[in-house]
Image: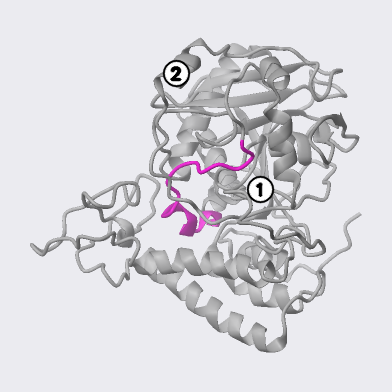
Protein backbone atom coordinates (compact mmCIF):
# COMPACT_ATOMS: atom_id res chain seq x y z
CA UNK A 1 0.00 0.00 0.00
CA UNK A 2 1.69 3.19 -1.15
CA UNK A 3 0.70 6.56 0.24
CA UNK A 4 3.58 8.32 -1.48
CA UNK A 5 6.56 7.40 -3.59
CA UNK A 6 9.34 5.59 -1.71
CA UNK A 7 12.87 4.62 -2.76
CA UNK A 8 13.03 1.06 -4.03
CA UNK A 9 14.31 -1.40 -1.47
CA UNK A 10 14.48 -5.17 -1.44
CA UNK A 11 11.58 -6.21 0.79
CA UNK A 12 12.09 -9.77 2.02
CA UNK A 13 9.28 -11.88 3.43
CA UNK A 14 9.02 -11.10 7.13
CA UNK A 15 6.88 -12.84 9.73
CA UNK A 16 5.49 -9.99 11.75
CA UNK A 17 4.14 -9.95 15.26
CA UNK A 18 1.91 -8.41 17.87
CA UNK A 19 1.77 -9.61 21.45
CA UNK A 20 -0.29 -9.03 24.53
CA UNK A 21 1.01 -5.91 26.20
CA UNK A 22 2.54 -6.86 29.53
CA UNK A 23 2.16 -4.51 32.45
CA UNK A 24 5.66 -4.46 33.93
CA UNK A 25 5.79 -3.87 37.66
CA UNK A 26 9.34 -2.56 37.69
CA UNK A 27 12.60 -2.46 35.76
CA UNK A 28 14.89 -1.41 38.56
CA UNK A 29 18.60 -1.86 37.98
CA UNK A 30 20.58 -3.68 40.63
CA UNK A 31 23.67 -1.89 42.01
CA UNK A 32 25.82 -4.34 40.05
CA UNK A 33 23.92 -3.61 36.84
CA UNK A 34 24.01 0.15 37.40
CA UNK A 35 27.75 -0.11 37.95
CA UNK A 36 28.08 -2.01 34.69
CA UNK A 37 26.18 0.69 32.83
CA UNK A 38 28.58 3.31 34.12
CA UNK A 39 31.51 1.20 33.00
CA UNK A 40 29.97 0.18 29.67
CA UNK A 41 31.90 1.13 26.59
CA UNK A 42 29.68 3.61 24.80
CA UNK A 43 30.49 2.29 21.36
CA UNK A 44 33.03 0.27 19.49
CA UNK A 45 33.81 -0.53 15.89
CA UNK A 46 34.74 -4.22 16.02
CA UNK A 47 33.33 -5.88 12.91
CA UNK A 48 34.02 -9.59 13.10
CA UNK A 49 30.38 -10.35 13.94
CA UNK A 50 27.61 -10.70 11.36
CA UNK A 51 29.12 -8.83 8.37
CA UNK A 52 32.93 -8.62 8.59
CA UNK A 53 33.29 -6.63 5.37
CA UNK A 54 31.51 -3.46 6.50
CA UNK A 55 32.18 -0.95 9.23
CA UNK A 56 30.10 -1.51 12.36
CA UNK A 57 29.35 0.54 15.46
CA UNK A 58 27.68 -0.93 18.52
CA UNK A 59 27.17 0.20 22.07
CA UNK A 60 25.00 2.14 24.49
CA UNK A 61 23.56 5.60 23.94
CA UNK A 62 21.73 7.61 26.57
CA UNK A 63 17.98 8.04 26.68
CA UNK A 64 16.34 9.90 29.55
CA UNK A 65 16.12 9.20 33.30
CA UNK A 66 19.26 7.06 33.21
CA UNK A 67 17.95 4.74 30.50
CA UNK A 68 20.45 3.42 27.95
CA UNK A 69 19.59 2.05 24.52
CA UNK A 70 21.74 -0.48 22.69
CA UNK A 71 22.54 0.48 19.07
CA UNK A 72 24.10 -1.64 16.30
CA UNK A 73 24.99 0.19 13.09
CA UNK A 74 26.15 -1.37 9.81
CA UNK A 75 27.48 0.62 6.89
CA UNK A 76 26.19 -0.04 3.39
CA UNK A 77 27.85 -2.73 1.27
CA UNK A 78 27.56 -0.46 -1.76
CA UNK A 79 28.27 3.22 -1.18
CA UNK A 80 28.21 4.10 2.52
CA UNK A 81 29.22 7.70 1.86
CA UNK A 82 26.12 8.40 -0.28
CA UNK A 83 23.55 5.79 0.74
CA UNK A 84 20.83 6.77 3.23
CA UNK A 85 20.46 5.54 6.79
CA UNK A 86 17.51 3.32 7.70
CA UNK A 87 16.61 3.01 11.37
CA UNK A 88 14.77 -0.30 11.90
CA UNK A 89 12.43 -0.78 14.87
CA UNK A 90 11.02 -4.13 15.89
CA UNK A 91 7.66 -4.53 17.57
CA UNK A 92 6.29 -6.11 20.70
CA UNK A 93 6.62 -3.79 22.50
CA UNK A 94 9.68 -5.51 23.93
CA UNK A 95 11.08 -7.27 20.86
CA UNK A 96 14.80 -6.73 20.48
CA UNK A 97 16.21 -5.01 17.43
CA UNK A 98 18.54 -8.02 17.21
CA UNK A 99 15.58 -9.86 15.68
CA UNK A 100 15.94 -7.49 12.76
CA UNK A 101 19.71 -8.00 12.61
CA UNK A 102 19.75 -11.81 12.61
CA UNK A 103 16.33 -12.98 11.40
CA UNK A 104 14.93 -10.35 9.05
CA UNK A 105 16.54 -7.51 7.08
CA UNK A 106 19.98 -7.44 8.72
CA UNK A 107 23.37 -8.33 7.23
CA UNK A 108 23.39 -11.92 8.53
CA UNK A 109 21.06 -14.85 9.07
CA UNK A 110 21.25 -17.05 12.16
CA UNK A 111 21.25 -20.81 11.71
CA UNK A 112 18.48 -22.93 13.22
CA UNK A 113 20.35 -24.00 16.35
CA UNK A 114 21.70 -20.55 17.16
CA UNK A 115 25.40 -21.35 16.88
CA UNK A 116 26.55 -19.47 13.79
CA UNK A 117 25.54 -16.96 11.12
CA UNK A 118 25.75 -16.63 7.35
CA UNK A 119 25.67 -13.47 5.25
CA UNK A 120 22.20 -12.39 4.21
CA UNK A 121 22.32 -11.63 0.47
CA UNK A 122 18.97 -9.81 0.71
CA UNK A 123 19.95 -7.50 3.56
CA UNK A 124 18.81 -3.92 3.27
CA UNK A 125 22.41 -2.82 3.81
CA UNK A 126 22.95 -3.81 0.19
CA UNK A 127 21.87 -0.22 -0.60
CA UNK A 128 21.62 1.56 2.75
CA UNK A 129 23.34 2.07 6.07
CA UNK A 130 21.36 0.19 8.71
CA UNK A 131 20.78 1.11 12.36
CA UNK A 132 19.12 -1.33 14.77
CA UNK A 133 18.06 -0.38 18.30
CA UNK A 134 16.89 -2.29 21.36
CA UNK A 135 13.98 -0.17 22.54
CA UNK A 136 12.04 0.55 24.72
CA UNK A 137 14.28 0.16 27.75
CA UNK A 138 14.16 -3.46 28.85
CA UNK A 139 14.12 -4.83 25.30
CA UNK A 140 17.19 -6.84 24.35
CA UNK A 141 20.40 -5.39 25.74
CA UNK A 142 18.96 -1.97 26.65
CA UNK A 143 18.71 -1.13 30.34
CA UNK A 144 17.54 1.49 32.76
CA UNK A 145 16.12 2.14 36.20
CA UNK A 146 12.65 3.36 35.21
CA UNK A 147 9.65 1.85 33.44
CA UNK A 148 8.87 3.33 30.02
CA UNK A 149 5.30 4.61 29.96
CA UNK A 150 4.09 4.23 26.41
CA UNK A 151 5.23 5.05 22.91
CA UNK A 152 5.80 8.77 23.37
CA UNK A 153 8.10 8.31 26.36
CA UNK A 154 9.96 5.61 24.43
CA UNK A 155 10.18 8.08 21.55
CA UNK A 156 11.77 10.73 23.77
CA UNK A 157 14.40 8.18 24.82
CA UNK A 158 15.06 7.14 21.25
CA UNK A 159 15.36 10.70 19.97
CA UNK A 160 17.77 11.62 22.77
CA UNK A 161 19.91 8.57 21.99
CA UNK A 162 19.86 9.32 18.25
CA UNK A 163 21.07 12.84 18.95
CA UNK A 164 23.99 11.43 20.91
CA UNK A 165 24.77 8.95 18.13
CA UNK A 166 24.97 11.70 15.51
CA UNK A 167 26.93 13.99 17.81
CA UNK A 168 29.52 11.27 18.24
CA UNK A 169 29.54 10.09 14.62
CA UNK A 170 29.24 13.35 12.72
CA UNK A 171 30.07 11.75 9.36
CA UNK A 172 26.53 10.35 9.24
CA UNK A 173 24.44 13.28 10.42
CA UNK A 174 23.74 14.87 7.02
CA UNK A 175 22.58 11.67 5.33
CA UNK A 176 18.98 11.11 4.26
CA UNK A 177 17.27 9.29 7.11
CA UNK A 178 14.41 6.80 6.94
CA UNK A 179 12.62 4.88 9.69
CA UNK A 180 11.20 1.41 9.15
CA UNK A 181 9.49 -1.05 11.42
CA UNK A 182 6.99 -3.83 11.86
CA UNK A 183 4.01 -4.74 14.02
CA UNK A 184 4.07 -2.41 17.07
CA UNK A 185 6.39 -0.37 14.90
CA UNK A 186 3.05 0.98 13.67
CA UNK A 187 3.24 2.99 16.88
CA UNK A 188 6.99 3.49 17.18
CA UNK A 189 7.75 4.52 13.58
CA UNK A 190 5.29 7.41 13.09
CA UNK A 191 5.98 8.64 16.63
CA UNK A 192 9.76 8.97 16.16
CA UNK A 193 9.27 10.45 12.68
CA UNK A 194 6.90 13.06 14.12
CA UNK A 195 9.35 13.80 16.94
CA UNK A 196 12.26 14.28 14.52
CA UNK A 197 10.15 16.48 12.24
CA UNK A 198 8.97 18.72 15.09
CA UNK A 199 12.45 19.02 16.60
CA UNK A 200 13.83 19.97 13.18
CA UNK A 201 11.27 22.78 12.99
CA UNK A 202 12.55 24.02 16.36
CA UNK A 203 16.10 24.07 15.00
CA UNK A 204 17.43 21.17 17.07
CA UNK A 205 21.02 20.14 16.44
CA UNK A 206 22.20 17.87 15.11
CA UNK A 207 19.40 17.98 12.57
CA UNK A 208 18.20 14.55 11.43
CA UNK A 209 17.31 14.61 7.73
CA UNK A 210 14.09 12.60 7.91
CA UNK A 211 12.85 11.72 4.42
CA UNK A 212 10.41 8.85 4.83
CA UNK A 213 9.03 5.95 6.82
CA UNK A 214 8.07 2.35 6.04
CA UNK A 215 5.76 0.19 8.16
CA UNK A 216 5.29 -3.52 7.52
CA UNK A 217 2.16 -5.27 8.81
CA UNK A 218 1.77 -2.47 11.29
CA UNK A 219 -0.34 -2.43 14.42
CA UNK A 220 -1.89 1.03 14.30
CA UNK A 221 -5.61 1.07 15.11
CA UNK A 222 -7.10 -1.91 16.99
CA UNK A 223 -10.66 -0.62 16.71
CA UNK A 224 -10.35 -1.21 12.97
CA UNK A 225 -7.88 -4.07 12.85
CA UNK A 226 -9.57 -6.51 15.24
CA UNK A 227 -12.51 -6.61 12.83
CA UNK A 228 -10.24 -8.31 10.26
CA UNK A 229 -9.52 -11.42 12.35
CA UNK A 230 -12.63 -13.39 11.36
CA UNK A 231 -12.07 -12.84 7.63
CA UNK A 232 -8.34 -13.55 7.86
CA UNK A 233 -8.96 -16.81 9.71
CA UNK A 234 -11.85 -17.99 7.54
CA UNK A 235 -11.45 -16.82 3.93
CA UNK A 236 -8.64 -14.32 3.39
CA UNK A 237 -7.91 -15.43 -0.15
CA UNK A 238 -4.17 -15.44 0.58
CA UNK A 239 -3.62 -17.71 3.60
CA UNK A 240 -5.03 -21.10 4.63
CA UNK A 241 -8.56 -21.18 6.02
CA UNK A 242 -8.22 -22.25 9.66
CA UNK A 243 -11.71 -21.92 11.20
CA UNK A 244 -15.18 -23.18 10.33
CA UNK A 245 -18.05 -20.97 9.27
CA UNK A 246 -19.70 -21.37 12.67
CA UNK A 247 -16.46 -20.29 14.34
CA UNK A 248 -16.25 -17.38 11.93
CA UNK A 249 -19.67 -16.12 13.01
CA UNK A 250 -18.73 -16.41 16.69
CA UNK A 251 -15.41 -14.64 16.21
CA UNK A 252 -17.07 -11.92 14.15
CA UNK A 253 -19.57 -11.23 16.92
CA UNK A 254 -16.78 -11.12 19.53
CA UNK A 255 -14.59 -8.78 17.50
CA UNK A 256 -17.45 -6.35 16.83
CA UNK A 257 -17.91 -6.10 20.60
CA UNK A 258 -14.15 -5.78 21.04
CA UNK A 259 -13.92 -2.92 18.56
CA UNK A 260 -16.78 -1.19 20.35
CA UNK A 261 -14.91 -1.49 23.67
CA UNK A 262 -11.78 0.04 22.17
CA UNK A 263 -13.83 3.01 21.00
CA UNK A 264 -15.57 3.33 24.37
CA UNK A 265 -12.27 3.21 26.21
CA UNK A 266 -10.80 5.99 24.11
CA UNK A 267 -13.94 8.04 24.75
CA UNK A 268 -13.77 7.49 28.51
CA UNK A 269 -16.76 5.15 28.74
CA UNK A 270 -15.68 2.82 31.56
CA UNK A 271 -17.82 0.80 33.93
CA UNK A 272 -15.80 2.36 36.75
CA UNK A 273 -15.32 5.69 35.04
CA UNK A 274 -17.71 7.96 36.89
CA UNK A 275 -14.84 9.83 38.53
CA UNK A 276 -12.89 10.32 35.33
CA UNK A 277 -12.70 13.59 33.47
CA UNK A 278 -11.43 14.07 29.90
CA UNK A 279 -7.91 15.37 29.54
CA UNK A 280 -5.50 16.27 26.77
CA UNK A 281 -1.95 14.99 26.88
CA UNK A 282 0.90 16.83 25.22
CA UNK A 283 0.36 14.53 22.25
CA UNK A 284 -3.31 15.38 21.90
CA UNK A 285 -4.76 12.05 23.01
CA UNK A 286 -7.64 11.86 25.47
CA UNK A 287 -7.85 8.59 27.40
CA UNK A 288 -9.81 9.31 30.60
CA UNK A 289 -10.94 5.78 31.36
CA UNK A 290 -7.41 4.78 32.31
CA UNK A 291 -6.53 7.79 34.45
CA UNK A 292 -7.01 6.11 37.80
CA UNK A 293 -4.67 4.88 40.49
CA UNK A 294 -4.42 4.17 44.18
CA UNK A 295 -1.98 2.53 46.57
CA UNK A 296 -3.02 -0.94 45.46
CA UNK A 297 -2.58 -0.46 41.72
CA UNK A 298 1.17 -0.01 41.62
CA UNK A 299 2.46 -0.78 38.15
CA UNK A 300 -0.98 -0.97 36.57
CA UNK A 301 -1.84 2.68 36.13
CA UNK A 302 0.82 5.28 36.71
CA UNK A 303 -1.04 8.59 36.52
CA UNK A 304 -3.76 9.84 38.85
CA UNK A 305 -6.39 12.54 38.41
CA UNK A 306 -8.74 13.93 41.05
CA UNK A 307 -12.25 12.47 40.89
CA UNK A 308 -15.09 14.79 39.95
CA UNK A 309 -16.89 14.03 43.21
CA UNK A 310 -15.88 13.20 46.76
CA UNK A 311 -16.58 9.52 46.21
CA UNK A 312 -13.48 7.41 46.93
CA UNK A 313 -11.74 5.59 44.13
CA UNK A 314 -12.37 1.85 44.33
CA UNK A 315 -9.86 -0.17 46.32
CA UNK A 316 -9.15 -2.50 43.42
CA UNK A 317 -7.44 -1.78 40.15
CA UNK A 318 -9.92 0.17 38.06
CA UNK A 319 -7.87 -0.66 34.99
CA UNK A 320 -8.44 -4.37 35.57
CA UNK A 321 -12.23 -3.93 35.69
CA UNK A 322 -12.66 -1.32 33.01
CA UNK A 323 -13.87 -1.18 29.46
CA UNK A 324 -10.24 -0.53 28.58
CA UNK A 325 -9.08 -3.80 30.10
CA UNK A 326 -11.87 -5.61 28.27
CA UNK A 327 -10.65 -4.03 25.04
CA UNK A 328 -7.04 -5.10 25.65
CA UNK A 329 -8.05 -8.63 26.62
CA UNK A 330 -10.41 -9.28 23.71
CA UNK A 331 -7.87 -7.81 21.30
CA UNK A 332 -5.34 -10.39 22.47
CA UNK A 333 -7.82 -13.27 22.49
CA UNK A 334 -8.94 -12.54 18.96
CA UNK A 335 -5.35 -12.41 17.76
CA UNK A 336 -4.06 -15.55 19.46
CA UNK A 337 -6.72 -18.08 20.35
CA UNK A 338 -8.13 -18.99 16.88
CA UNK A 339 -4.71 -20.15 15.69
CA UNK A 340 -3.04 -21.28 18.90
CA UNK A 341 -5.60 -23.96 19.64
CA UNK A 342 -4.84 -25.43 16.22
CA UNK A 343 -1.07 -25.19 16.62
CA UNK A 344 -0.71 -22.63 13.82
CA UNK A 345 1.80 -19.79 13.93
CA UNK A 346 0.16 -16.40 14.29
CA UNK A 347 3.06 -14.86 12.35
CA UNK A 348 2.89 -17.22 9.35
CA UNK A 349 -0.33 -19.15 8.89
CA UNK A 350 1.39 -21.76 6.71
CA UNK A 351 3.47 -22.98 9.66
CA UNK A 352 2.37 -25.32 12.43
CA UNK A 353 4.10 -25.18 15.79
CA UNK A 354 4.50 -27.46 18.78
CA UNK A 355 2.73 -26.14 21.86
CA UNK A 356 4.70 -27.85 24.62
CA UNK A 357 4.40 -24.91 27.00
CA UNK A 358 3.46 -21.26 27.24
CA UNK A 359 6.29 -20.22 24.92
CA UNK A 360 8.35 -17.03 25.14
CA UNK A 361 7.14 -14.27 27.45
CA UNK A 362 7.06 -11.95 24.45
CA UNK A 363 6.98 -13.98 21.18
CA UNK A 364 8.73 -12.01 18.46
CA UNK A 365 9.26 -14.30 15.50
CA UNK A 366 8.57 -17.76 14.07
CA UNK A 367 8.44 -20.85 16.33
CA UNK A 368 11.89 -21.79 17.64
CA UNK A 369 13.68 -18.76 16.27
CA UNK A 370 13.39 -16.80 19.53
CA UNK A 371 15.24 -19.60 21.31
CA UNK A 372 17.97 -19.72 18.67
CA UNK A 373 18.54 -15.97 18.89
CA UNK A 374 18.69 -16.11 22.69
CA UNK A 375 21.19 -18.97 22.52
CA UNK A 376 23.49 -17.10 20.15
CA UNK A 377 23.47 -13.74 21.90
CA UNK A 378 24.01 -15.27 25.34
CA UNK A 379 27.36 -16.73 24.28
CA UNK A 380 30.10 -15.11 26.36
CA UNK A 381 32.34 -14.47 23.35
CA UNK A 382 29.54 -12.81 21.38
CA UNK A 383 28.69 -10.55 24.32
CA UNK A 384 32.35 -9.72 24.84
CA UNK A 385 32.66 -8.55 21.23
CA UNK A 386 29.49 -6.47 21.56
CA UNK A 387 30.61 -4.93 24.85
CA UNK A 388 27.54 -6.09 26.77
CA UNK A 389 26.97 -8.13 29.91
CA UNK A 390 23.31 -9.02 30.24
CA UNK A 391 21.15 -12.10 29.91
CA UNK A 392 19.56 -11.65 26.50
CA UNK A 393 15.93 -12.37 25.66
CA UNK A 394 14.58 -11.68 22.20
CA UNK A 395 11.31 -10.56 23.79
CA UNK A 396 11.09 -8.96 27.22
CA UNK A 397 8.47 -6.99 29.15
CA UNK A 398 9.44 -3.41 28.33
CA UNK A 399 7.31 -0.98 30.26
CA UNK A 400 3.72 0.11 30.69
CA UNK A 401 1.95 0.06 27.31
CA UNK A 402 -1.56 -0.84 28.46
CA UNK A 403 -3.06 2.53 27.55
CA UNK A 404 -0.80 2.98 24.57
CA UNK A 405 -1.92 -0.20 22.81
CA UNK A 406 -5.37 1.19 22.00
CA UNK A 407 -4.39 4.56 20.53
CA UNK A 408 -4.96 5.12 16.76
CA UNK A 409 -1.44 5.96 15.59
CA UNK A 410 -2.31 6.37 11.92
CA UNK A 411 -3.54 9.80 13.02
CA UNK A 412 0.11 10.90 13.11
CA UNK A 413 0.63 10.22 9.39
CA UNK A 414 -1.14 13.25 7.85
CA UNK A 415 1.32 15.61 9.54
CA UNK A 416 4.20 13.65 8.01
CA UNK A 417 2.62 13.58 4.55
CA UNK A 418 1.95 17.31 4.69
CA UNK A 419 5.65 17.82 5.43
CA UNK A 420 6.48 15.72 2.32
CA UNK A 421 7.86 12.90 4.42
CA UNK A 422 7.24 9.81 2.33
CA UNK A 423 5.13 6.98 3.73
CA UNK A 424 5.17 3.34 2.65
CA UNK A 425 2.84 0.74 4.15
CA UNK A 426 3.59 -2.84 3.10
CA UNK A 427 2.27 -6.25 4.09
CA UNK A 428 3.10 -9.91 4.10
CA UNK A 429 -0.02 -11.90 3.27
CA UNK A 430 0.46 -14.81 5.73
CA UNK A 431 0.69 -12.88 9.00
CA UNK A 432 -2.46 -13.20 11.10
CA UNK A 433 -1.90 -10.88 14.05
CA UNK A 434 -1.21 -7.73 12.02
CA UNK A 435 -2.78 -8.95 8.81
CA UNK A 436 -3.04 -7.19 5.48
CA UNK A 437 -6.85 -6.95 5.53
CA UNK A 438 -6.96 -4.83 8.66
CA UNK A 439 -3.92 -2.79 7.67
CA UNK A 440 -5.47 -1.91 4.31
CA UNK A 441 -8.63 -0.74 6.07
CA UNK A 442 -6.54 1.48 8.33
CA UNK A 443 -4.78 2.94 5.29
CA UNK A 444 -8.13 3.74 3.69
CA UNK A 445 -9.19 5.71 6.78
CA UNK A 446 -6.13 7.98 6.97
CA UNK A 447 -7.33 11.57 6.73
CA UNK A 448 -5.07 13.25 4.17
CA UNK A 449 -5.64 15.24 0.95
CA UNK A 450 -4.95 12.22 -1.26
CA UNK A 451 -7.36 9.92 0.53
CA UNK A 452 -10.18 9.86 -2.02
CA UNK A 453 -7.87 9.15 -4.95
CA UNK A 454 -6.00 6.54 -2.93
CA UNK A 455 -9.17 4.66 -2.01
CA UNK A 456 -10.40 4.71 -5.64
CA UNK A 457 -7.06 3.63 -7.09
CA UNK A 458 -7.19 0.21 -8.81
CA UNK A 459 -5.02 -2.64 -7.59
CA UNK A 460 -1.87 -3.24 -9.61
CA UNK A 461 0.63 -6.07 -9.77
CA UNK A 462 3.85 -5.07 -8.01
CA UNK A 463 6.90 -5.32 -10.25
Q: Give the range drawn in magenta.
A: 393-410
The answer, for residue 453, to whether it is visible in the render is no
| Residue 339 location (% of width, % of height) | 69, 69
Name above or below for residue 292 compared with residue 440.
above
Name above or below for residue 396 compared with residue 115.
below
N-terminal of the two: label 2 or label 1?
Answer: 2
Which residue of the protein is positioned furthest toward the front in this rendering? 356
Element type at marker 1?
Answer: loop
Q: Name the residue under label 1.
A: 364
Quarter of the image for residue 114 reads top right
- Location of the C terminus by quadrant is bottom right
Point out the frontmost of discs 2 and 1. Answer: 2
Residue at x 46%, y 75% (from the top left corner): 260
Display coloring: one colour
Mark 2–mark 1 Cα distance, whole angstroms, equals: 29 Å
- Location of the N terminus by quadrant is bottom right
Residue at x 61%, y 20% (from the top left corner): 388
Query: In the shown orientation, is residue 442 left or right of residue 205?
Result: right
Q: Determine which of the numbered discs, if any, sits on residue 32 in the image.
A: 2
* Residue in the foreground of this view, choosing between 280 and 48: 48
Residue at x 54%, y 27% (from the top left corner): 69
Amino acid sequence: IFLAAFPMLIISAIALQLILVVQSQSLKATPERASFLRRAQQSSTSQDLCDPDVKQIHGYYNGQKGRKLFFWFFESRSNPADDPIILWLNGGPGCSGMTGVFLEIGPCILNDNGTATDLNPYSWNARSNLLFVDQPTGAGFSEGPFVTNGTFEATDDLYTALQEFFQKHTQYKEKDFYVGGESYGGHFVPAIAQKIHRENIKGAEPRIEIRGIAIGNGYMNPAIQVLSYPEMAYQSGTAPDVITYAEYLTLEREMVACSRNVTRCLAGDSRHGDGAVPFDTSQGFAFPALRFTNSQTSGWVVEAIPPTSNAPIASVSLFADSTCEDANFCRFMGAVVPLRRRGISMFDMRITQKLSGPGPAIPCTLPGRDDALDRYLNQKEVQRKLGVNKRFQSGSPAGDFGRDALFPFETLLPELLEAEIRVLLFDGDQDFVCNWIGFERVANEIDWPGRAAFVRAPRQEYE
